[in-house]
Image (tube, helix red, strand yellow):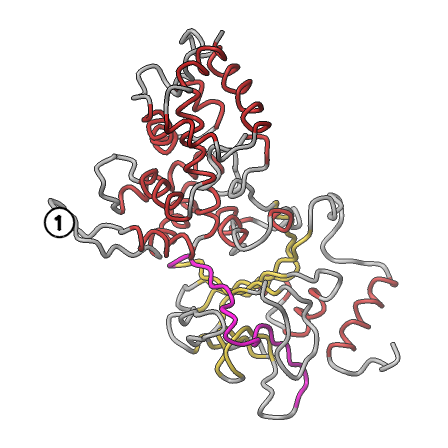
Amino acid sequence: MGNAQASASSTSSPRFSMASRAFSRQELDDLRPLFVSLAAQSQTGGRAISRPVFLEYFGIRGALGDRLFQLVARESGGGEGVTFEDLIVSKATYERGTRDEVDEFIYQLCDVTGDEVLERSDLETILASIRETIFSENKEAGEGSNKRTFEAFINSAVFSKDAEGVARKSMSLSDFRSWCILIPSLRKFLGSLLMPPDSGRPGFQVPALHYLENISPDLLLLNKEYAWHIGGGFSQQEVQEWRLLYHSSLHGQSFNTFLGNVTNGDAQTVIIVKDTEGFVFGGYASHPWERHSDFYGDMKTFLFKLYPEASIFRPTGANKNLQWCAVNFSSDSIPNGIGFGGQPHHFGFFLSANFDQGHSFTCTTFTSPALSKTNRFRPEVIECWGIQTKGALDEKAELVKGTVLERFKEDRNMLKLVGLANASD
Protein backbone atom coordinates (compact mmCIF):
# COMPACT_ATOMS: atom_id res chain seq x y z
CA MET A 1 0.00 0.00 0.00
CA GLY A 2 2.80 2.41 0.93
CA ASN A 3 4.48 1.63 -2.38
CA ALA A 4 1.35 2.45 -4.35
CA GLN A 5 0.78 5.67 -2.42
CA ALA A 6 4.36 6.75 -2.94
CA SER A 7 4.15 6.04 -6.65
CA ALA A 8 0.87 7.91 -7.09
CA SER A 9 2.12 11.09 -5.45
CA SER A 10 5.52 10.90 -7.08
CA THR A 11 4.46 10.53 -10.69
CA SER A 12 2.58 13.84 -10.57
CA SER A 13 5.78 15.79 -9.87
CA PRO A 14 7.94 17.03 -12.79
CA ARG A 15 10.90 17.30 -10.40
CA PHE A 16 10.47 13.66 -9.44
CA SER A 17 10.28 12.61 -13.10
CA MET A 18 13.48 14.50 -13.88
CA ALA A 19 15.27 13.22 -10.76
CA SER A 20 14.30 9.64 -11.56
CA ARG A 21 16.34 9.81 -14.75
CA ALA A 22 19.50 9.96 -12.63
CA PHE A 23 18.89 6.35 -11.59
CA SER A 24 18.56 3.09 -13.43
CA ARG A 25 15.31 1.14 -13.21
CA GLN A 26 17.08 -1.39 -10.99
CA GLU A 27 18.29 1.33 -8.63
CA LEU A 28 14.78 2.75 -8.30
CA ASP A 29 13.40 -0.73 -7.73
CA ASP A 30 15.99 -1.23 -4.96
CA LEU A 31 15.09 2.07 -3.29
CA ARG A 32 11.35 1.38 -3.20
CA PRO A 33 11.41 -1.54 -0.73
CA LEU A 34 13.78 0.44 1.49
CA PHE A 35 11.36 3.36 1.55
CA VAL A 36 8.36 1.06 2.13
CA SER A 37 10.13 -0.65 5.04
CA LEU A 38 11.12 2.61 6.74
CA ALA A 39 7.71 4.23 6.10
CA ALA A 40 5.98 1.19 7.62
CA GLN A 41 7.92 1.80 10.85
CA SER A 42 6.97 5.47 10.90
CA GLN A 43 3.25 5.39 11.77
CA THR A 44 2.44 7.56 8.76
CA GLY A 45 0.23 5.09 6.94
CA GLY A 46 3.18 4.23 4.69
CA ARG A 47 3.22 7.70 3.17
CA ALA A 48 6.49 8.99 4.59
CA ILE A 49 9.55 8.21 6.73
CA SER A 50 9.28 9.93 10.10
CA ARG A 51 12.15 11.91 11.56
CA PRO A 52 13.03 9.37 14.31
CA VAL A 53 13.08 6.45 11.84
CA PHE A 54 15.09 8.48 9.30
CA LEU A 55 17.71 9.46 11.88
CA GLU A 56 17.93 5.97 13.31
CA TYR A 57 18.41 4.35 9.90
CA PHE A 58 21.03 6.75 8.52
CA GLY A 59 22.73 7.06 11.90
CA ILE A 60 23.66 10.75 11.73
CA ARG A 61 23.71 12.15 15.25
CA GLY A 62 23.13 15.65 16.57
CA ALA A 63 22.09 18.77 14.69
CA LEU A 64 23.57 17.54 11.40
CA GLY A 65 21.07 14.68 11.30
CA ASP A 66 18.19 17.07 11.94
CA ARG A 67 19.39 19.40 9.19
CA LEU A 68 19.75 16.50 6.74
CA PHE A 69 16.17 15.40 7.47
CA GLN A 70 14.95 18.97 6.95
CA LEU A 71 16.66 19.32 3.56
CA VAL A 72 15.55 15.92 2.28
CA ALA A 73 11.92 16.49 3.33
CA ARG A 74 11.64 20.00 1.90
CA GLU A 75 10.24 18.92 -1.50
CA SER A 76 6.95 17.88 0.12
CA GLY A 77 7.13 20.37 2.97
CA GLY A 78 8.05 17.70 5.54
CA GLY A 79 4.61 17.63 7.16
CA GLU A 80 4.66 13.90 7.82
CA GLY A 81 8.28 13.22 6.98
CA VAL A 82 10.34 12.17 3.96
CA THR A 83 8.22 10.93 1.04
CA PHE A 84 9.52 8.69 -1.72
CA GLU A 85 9.54 11.76 -3.97
CA ASP A 86 11.64 13.65 -1.39
CA LEU A 87 14.14 10.80 -1.20
CA ILE A 88 14.62 10.49 -4.96
CA VAL A 89 14.82 14.23 -5.64
CA SER A 90 17.35 14.71 -2.82
CA LYS A 91 19.51 11.73 -3.76
CA ALA A 92 19.52 12.83 -7.42
CA THR A 93 20.85 16.25 -6.43
CA TYR A 94 23.11 15.15 -3.59
CA GLU A 95 24.62 12.02 -5.15
CA ARG A 96 24.15 12.39 -8.92
CA GLY A 97 24.10 16.15 -9.46
CA THR A 98 26.75 18.38 -11.01
CA ARG A 99 29.68 19.43 -8.85
CA ASP A 100 28.03 22.80 -8.23
CA GLU A 101 24.72 21.17 -7.27
CA VAL A 102 26.36 18.74 -4.86
CA ASP A 103 28.57 21.42 -3.27
CA GLU A 104 25.58 23.74 -2.86
CA PHE A 105 23.55 20.97 -1.17
CA ILE A 106 26.39 20.18 1.27
CA TYR A 107 26.98 23.89 1.88
CA GLN A 108 23.30 24.29 2.83
CA LEU A 109 23.55 21.14 4.93
CA CYS A 110 26.31 22.71 7.03
CA ASP A 111 24.15 25.80 7.63
CA VAL A 112 22.48 23.98 10.49
CA THR A 113 20.43 26.98 11.62
CA GLY A 114 19.07 27.55 8.12
CA ASP A 115 19.75 31.29 8.26
CA GLU A 116 21.82 31.26 5.03
CA VAL A 117 24.92 32.35 6.95
CA LEU A 118 27.66 29.78 7.52
CA GLU A 119 29.55 30.82 10.65
CA ARG A 120 32.16 29.29 12.93
CA SER A 121 29.38 28.16 15.26
CA ASP A 122 27.84 26.14 12.40
CA LEU A 123 31.17 24.38 11.81
CA GLU A 124 31.51 23.66 15.51
CA THR A 125 28.04 22.09 15.45
CA ILE A 126 28.86 20.01 12.36
CA LEU A 127 32.09 18.72 13.89
CA ALA A 128 30.28 17.93 17.15
CA SER A 129 27.84 15.78 15.13
CA ILE A 130 30.74 14.07 13.37
CA ARG A 131 32.38 13.39 16.72
CA GLU A 132 29.16 11.92 18.08
CA THR A 133 28.47 9.88 14.93
CA ILE A 134 31.94 8.45 14.33
CA PHE A 135 33.80 8.61 17.64
CA SER A 136 31.05 8.14 20.24
CA GLU A 137 32.26 4.61 20.98
CA ASN A 138 35.95 5.52 20.97
CA LYS A 139 37.05 5.36 24.58
CA GLU A 140 40.75 5.77 23.81
CA ALA A 141 40.52 9.52 23.21
CA GLY A 142 39.22 11.67 26.04
CA GLU A 143 36.96 14.69 25.64
CA GLY A 144 39.91 17.08 25.94
CA SER A 145 41.72 15.37 23.07
CA ASN A 146 38.59 15.51 20.91
CA LYS A 147 38.08 19.20 21.58
CA ARG A 148 41.68 20.12 20.79
CA THR A 149 41.68 18.04 17.61
CA PHE A 150 38.42 19.41 16.22
CA GLU A 151 39.48 22.96 17.01
CA ALA A 152 42.43 22.37 14.67
CA PHE A 153 39.97 21.48 11.88
CA ILE A 154 38.11 24.77 12.34
CA ASN A 155 41.36 26.73 12.55
CA SER A 156 42.08 25.83 8.92
CA ALA A 157 38.80 27.38 7.74
CA VAL A 158 38.61 30.81 6.10
CA PHE A 159 35.68 33.22 6.58
CA SER A 160 35.75 35.91 3.90
CA LYS A 161 32.08 36.70 3.25
CA ASP A 162 30.32 39.78 4.58
CA ALA A 163 26.80 38.88 5.67
CA GLU A 164 24.06 41.41 6.34
CA GLY A 165 23.24 41.75 10.02
CA VAL A 166 26.24 39.68 11.11
CA ALA A 167 29.21 41.38 12.75
CA ARG A 168 31.74 38.67 11.91
CA LYS A 169 32.58 37.43 8.44
CA SER A 170 30.99 34.18 7.33
CA MET A 171 32.10 31.32 5.09
CA SER A 172 31.38 31.66 1.39
CA LEU A 173 30.79 28.65 -0.87
CA SER A 174 34.30 29.16 -2.24
CA ASP A 175 35.71 29.22 1.32
CA PHE A 176 33.80 26.02 2.06
CA ARG A 177 35.14 24.24 -1.02
CA SER A 178 38.69 25.21 -0.06
CA TRP A 179 38.15 23.91 3.47
CA CYS A 180 36.91 20.58 2.14
CA ILE A 181 40.05 20.26 -0.02
CA LEU A 182 42.20 20.73 3.08
CA ILE A 183 40.15 18.21 5.07
CA PRO A 184 39.10 15.50 2.58
CA SER A 185 37.69 13.23 5.32
CA LEU A 186 35.14 15.93 6.08
CA ARG A 187 34.08 16.14 2.42
CA LYS A 188 33.86 12.35 2.11
CA PHE A 189 31.71 12.15 5.24
CA LEU A 190 29.36 14.99 4.26
CA GLY A 191 29.00 13.54 0.75
CA SER A 192 27.89 10.05 1.80
CA LEU A 193 25.19 10.62 4.44
CA LEU A 194 22.34 9.18 2.33
CA MET A 195 24.22 6.03 1.40
CA PRO A 196 23.05 2.79 3.08
CA PRO A 197 24.74 2.52 6.50
CA ASP A 198 26.06 -0.98 5.75
CA SER A 199 27.78 0.05 2.50
CA GLY A 200 31.07 1.19 4.03
CA ARG A 201 30.30 4.88 3.63
CA PRO A 202 33.35 7.03 2.73
CA GLY A 203 34.40 9.30 5.56
CA PHE A 204 33.00 7.00 8.25
CA GLN A 205 36.10 4.78 8.52
CA VAL A 206 38.67 5.31 11.27
CA PRO A 207 41.97 3.41 11.12
CA ALA A 208 42.56 0.79 13.79
CA LEU A 209 45.72 1.90 15.59
CA HIS A 210 47.92 -0.97 16.78
CA TYR A 211 50.68 -0.55 19.36
CA LEU A 212 52.04 -2.48 22.32
CA GLU A 213 49.70 -2.68 25.30
CA ASN A 214 52.23 -1.12 27.65
CA ILE A 215 52.27 2.12 25.63
CA SER A 216 49.98 4.82 26.98
CA PRO A 217 47.83 6.56 24.33
CA ASP A 218 48.80 9.84 25.99
CA LEU A 219 52.36 9.29 24.75
CA LEU A 220 51.30 9.15 21.12
CA LEU A 221 50.93 12.09 18.75
CA LEU A 222 48.39 10.20 16.66
CA ASN A 223 44.87 9.80 18.01
CA LYS A 224 41.72 8.48 16.35
CA GLU A 225 40.61 11.92 15.20
CA TYR A 226 43.95 12.77 13.57
CA ALA A 227 44.02 9.31 11.96
CA TRP A 228 40.54 9.96 10.52
CA HIS A 229 41.85 13.25 9.10
CA ILE A 230 45.00 11.75 7.55
CA GLY A 231 43.00 8.77 6.29
CA GLY A 232 41.01 11.13 4.10
CA GLY A 233 43.96 11.15 1.74
CA PHE A 234 43.80 7.37 1.21
CA SER A 235 41.55 4.83 -0.42
CA GLN A 236 39.14 3.10 1.98
CA GLN A 237 41.26 -0.06 1.99
CA GLU A 238 44.35 1.84 3.09
CA VAL A 239 42.47 3.44 5.96
CA GLN A 240 41.99 0.08 7.69
CA GLU A 241 44.91 -0.74 10.01
CA TRP A 242 48.00 1.17 11.09
CA ARG A 243 50.72 -0.04 13.44
CA LEU A 244 53.31 1.94 15.37
CA LEU A 245 56.78 1.31 13.94
CA TYR A 246 58.86 3.99 15.64
CA HIS A 247 58.51 6.52 18.44
CA SER A 248 61.43 8.65 19.52
CA SER A 249 60.45 8.49 23.21
CA LEU A 250 60.40 4.68 23.08
CA HIS A 251 63.19 3.85 20.63
CA GLY A 252 65.46 6.86 21.07
CA GLN A 253 65.91 9.78 18.70
CA SER A 254 68.03 7.75 16.28
CA PHE A 255 67.94 7.80 12.49
CA ASN A 256 69.45 4.31 12.27
CA THR A 257 66.85 2.87 14.66
CA PHE A 258 64.12 4.57 12.67
CA LEU A 259 65.36 3.05 9.40
CA GLY A 260 65.72 -0.37 10.99
CA ASN A 261 62.14 -0.27 12.29
CA VAL A 262 60.48 0.98 9.11
CA THR A 263 62.18 -1.29 6.55
CA ASN A 264 60.53 -4.56 7.52
CA GLY A 265 57.80 -4.80 4.94
CA ASP A 266 55.69 -1.69 5.56
CA ALA A 267 55.93 0.06 2.22
CA GLN A 268 53.52 2.85 3.19
CA THR A 269 54.23 4.99 6.23
CA VAL A 270 52.96 8.08 8.01
CA ILE A 271 55.58 10.23 9.75
CA ILE A 272 54.47 12.72 12.38
CA VAL A 273 56.61 15.32 14.14
CA LYS A 274 55.92 17.58 17.07
CA ASP A 275 58.43 20.41 17.22
CA THR A 276 59.58 22.37 20.25
CA GLU A 277 57.05 25.12 19.41
CA GLY A 278 54.17 22.66 19.81
CA PHE A 279 53.33 22.41 16.08
CA VAL A 280 52.35 18.91 14.87
CA PHE A 281 52.74 17.96 11.20
CA GLY A 282 54.10 15.28 8.90
CA GLY A 283 53.91 13.40 5.65
CA TYR A 284 52.62 10.22 4.05
CA ALA A 285 55.21 8.18 2.13
CA SER A 286 53.72 5.81 -0.44
CA HIS A 287 57.06 4.08 -1.12
CA PRO A 288 59.50 2.33 1.27
CA TRP A 289 62.28 4.37 2.84
CA GLU A 290 65.25 3.32 0.70
CA ARG A 291 68.61 4.90 -0.01
CA HIS A 292 68.47 7.22 -3.06
CA SER A 293 70.62 10.07 -4.31
CA ASP A 294 67.60 11.87 -5.75
CA PHE A 295 63.85 12.21 -5.29
CA TYR A 296 61.56 9.23 -5.87
CA GLY A 297 57.98 8.19 -5.00
CA ASP A 298 54.61 8.73 -6.67
CA MET A 299 51.64 11.08 -6.68
CA LYS A 300 49.98 9.36 -3.71
CA THR A 301 52.45 11.07 -1.37
CA PHE A 302 51.20 14.08 0.58
CA LEU A 303 52.02 16.44 3.45
CA PHE A 304 49.73 17.37 6.33
CA LYS A 305 49.28 19.60 9.33
CA LEU A 306 47.63 18.40 12.53
CA TYR A 307 48.04 21.22 15.06
CA PRO A 308 47.29 24.10 15.54
CA GLU A 309 45.67 23.78 12.10
CA ALA A 310 44.66 20.56 10.36
CA SER A 311 45.16 20.35 6.59
CA ILE A 312 46.27 17.96 3.84
CA PHE A 313 48.40 19.08 0.89
CA ARG A 314 48.42 16.81 -2.17
CA PRO A 315 50.90 16.82 -5.07
CA THR A 316 50.15 19.39 -7.76
CA GLY A 317 52.11 17.73 -10.58
CA ALA A 318 54.41 20.77 -10.78
CA ASN A 319 57.39 18.43 -10.30
CA LYS A 320 58.23 14.88 -9.22
CA ASN A 321 60.18 15.87 -6.11
CA LEU A 322 58.03 13.74 -3.84
CA GLN A 323 60.03 11.56 -1.44
CA TRP A 324 63.67 11.78 -0.28
CA CYS A 325 65.86 9.33 1.63
CA ALA A 326 69.61 9.96 1.61
CA VAL A 327 71.91 7.91 3.84
CA ASN A 328 75.71 8.20 4.21
CA PHE A 329 76.31 10.52 1.26
CA SER A 330 79.33 12.80 1.52
CA SER A 331 78.26 15.35 -1.09
CA ASP A 332 76.86 18.65 0.15
CA SER A 333 74.35 18.56 -2.69
CA ILE A 334 72.77 15.40 -1.25
CA PRO A 335 71.65 16.20 2.33
CA ASN A 336 71.38 13.08 4.49
CA GLY A 337 67.96 12.57 5.98
CA ILE A 338 64.36 12.06 4.92
CA GLY A 339 62.09 14.58 3.28
CA PHE A 340 59.20 15.50 1.01
CA GLY A 341 58.83 18.02 -1.81
CA GLY A 342 60.70 21.16 -2.75
CA GLN A 343 64.44 21.01 -3.47
CA PRO A 344 67.50 19.72 -1.59
CA HIS A 345 68.20 22.06 1.36
CA HIS A 346 64.80 23.67 0.73
CA PHE A 347 62.29 20.86 1.26
CA GLY A 348 58.60 21.03 1.97
CA PHE A 349 59.42 18.88 5.01
CA PHE A 350 62.83 17.52 6.00
CA LEU A 351 64.40 15.73 8.97
CA SER A 352 68.19 15.62 9.15
CA ALA A 353 69.99 12.29 9.56
CA ASN A 354 70.76 13.19 13.17
CA PHE A 355 67.06 13.61 13.88
CA ASP A 356 67.94 16.71 15.87
CA GLN A 357 66.78 19.36 13.42
CA GLY A 358 64.63 19.85 10.36
CA HIS A 359 63.11 22.46 8.09
CA SER A 360 59.89 23.18 6.22
CA PHE A 361 59.49 25.71 3.43
CA THR A 362 56.68 26.66 1.09
CA CYS A 363 56.91 24.33 -1.90
CA THR A 364 55.22 24.00 -5.26
CA THR A 365 55.30 20.19 -5.13
CA PHE A 366 52.31 20.22 -2.78
CA THR A 367 51.38 23.93 -2.80
CA SER A 368 52.03 23.69 0.91
CA PRO A 369 53.04 26.45 3.31
CA ALA A 370 55.70 25.97 5.96
CA LEU A 371 54.31 23.24 8.22
CA SER A 372 56.22 24.43 11.28
CA LYS A 373 55.96 27.79 13.06
CA THR A 374 59.34 28.83 11.68
CA ASN A 375 61.12 27.41 8.63
CA ARG A 376 63.72 25.68 10.76
CA PHE A 377 62.58 23.58 13.68
CA ARG A 378 63.81 21.16 16.30
CA PRO A 379 61.79 17.96 16.71
CA GLU A 380 60.56 17.12 20.18
CA VAL A 381 58.78 13.89 19.18
CA ILE A 382 59.08 11.81 15.99
CA GLU A 383 56.55 9.06 15.31
CA CYS A 384 56.07 6.66 12.39
CA TRP A 385 53.15 4.36 11.56
CA GLY A 386 53.03 1.58 8.98
CA ILE A 387 49.84 1.20 6.95
CA GLN A 388 48.43 -2.27 6.39
CA THR A 389 45.26 -3.36 4.68
CA LYS A 390 42.52 -5.16 6.61
CA GLY A 391 43.47 -8.63 7.80
CA ALA A 392 47.18 -8.24 7.09
CA LEU A 393 47.98 -7.66 10.74
CA ASP A 394 47.98 -10.59 13.15
CA GLU A 395 46.23 -9.41 16.29
CA LYS A 396 48.84 -10.98 18.48
CA ALA A 397 51.90 -9.91 16.49
CA GLU A 398 54.44 -7.91 18.45
CA LEU A 399 55.85 -4.72 17.04
CA VAL A 400 59.49 -5.73 17.58
CA LYS A 401 60.55 -9.04 16.00
CA GLY A 402 62.78 -11.23 18.09
CA THR A 403 63.91 -14.28 16.15
CA VAL A 404 67.45 -14.62 14.83
CA LEU A 405 66.21 -14.98 11.26
CA GLU A 406 64.05 -11.86 11.47
CA ARG A 407 66.85 -9.88 13.09
CA PHE A 408 69.15 -10.99 10.27
CA LYS A 409 66.62 -9.71 7.72
CA GLU A 410 66.46 -6.38 9.53
CA ASP A 411 70.25 -6.10 9.51
CA ARG A 412 70.37 -6.86 5.79
CA ASN A 413 67.76 -4.19 5.12
CA MET A 414 69.84 -1.69 7.06
CA LEU A 415 72.95 -2.62 5.10
CA LYS A 416 71.06 -2.04 1.86
CA LEU A 417 69.98 1.37 3.07
CA VAL A 418 73.50 2.49 3.86
CA GLY A 419 74.79 1.04 0.61
CA LEU A 420 76.99 -1.69 2.09
CA ALA A 421 75.05 -4.82 1.18
CA ASN A 422 76.36 -7.06 -1.55
CA ALA A 423 75.21 -5.61 -4.89
CA SER A 424 74.22 -9.06 -6.05
CA ASP A 425 71.71 -9.49 -3.20
Label 1: how many residues lie within 10 Å, few (<14), some (14-19) or many (20+)?
few
Q: Amino acid at mark 1?
A: Ala
Q: Is residue 332 above or below residue 352?
A: below
Q: Is residue 336 above or below residue 400?
A: below
Which residue is rendered at x = 59% and y = 61% of the image? 270
Which residue is rendered at x = 44% and y = 31% of the image? 60
Along the line of sight, the residue nearer the viewer: 79 or 187: 79
Along the line of sight, the residue nearer the viewer: 240 or 222: 240
320 within the magenta span: yes
Q: How many marks?
A: 1
Q: Position of residue 251 (x, y in %)?
A: 64, 64
* Residue 135 seen: no
Q: Where does the magenta region start and end?
A: 308-329
List the residue tagged with mark 1. Answer: 167
Q: Position of residue 356 (x, y in %)?
A: 53, 76
Q: Position of residue 55 (x, y in %)?
A: 43, 24
Q: Is residue 313 above or below residue 19?
A: below
Direction from residue 115 to residue 365 in the image, left or right: right
